[in-house]
Image: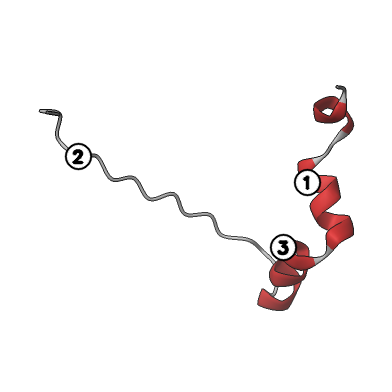
Amino acid sequence: MNTEPEVKVRVTRRFNASLERVLDARLDLEMIDKRMFVPAVREE
């Protein structure tokens, strides 16, 4: 049984960009590649 109190965390970040641009960045495959698979991470 866990006796530790439950901890909840909320992280918020504001972008100086239109909603359309933010959503495009999340859905565009080329932009996803740039964010998730940068060369330093891809060295396998």
Question: Looking at numbered disc 2 in the image, what kind of residue is underneath it?
Answer: Glu
Q: Is 1 on the left or on the right of 24, as rendered? A: left
Image height check: is 43 above or below 8? above
Q: Provide the residue designation for mark 2.
A: 6
Front residue of 3/19: it is 3
Quarter of the rendering occupied by the N terminus: top left
Question: Looking at numbered disc 1 in the image, what kind of residue is underneath it?
Answer: Arg
Image height check: is 19 above or below 6? below
* Residue 15 found in image quarter: bottom right
Image height check: is 28 above or below 33? below
Distance of label 3 from label 2 (alpha carbons): 31 Å
Foreground tag (1 vs 2): 2
Quarter of the rendering occupied by the C terminus: top right
Front residue of 24/14: it is 24
Q: Provide the residue designation for mark 3.
A: 26
Tag 1, which secondary structure? helix
Across and down, in percent, residue 17 comes to 70, 68
Q: Residues within 10 Å of mark 1 (few under 14, many from 20)?
A: few
Circle number at residue 35: 1
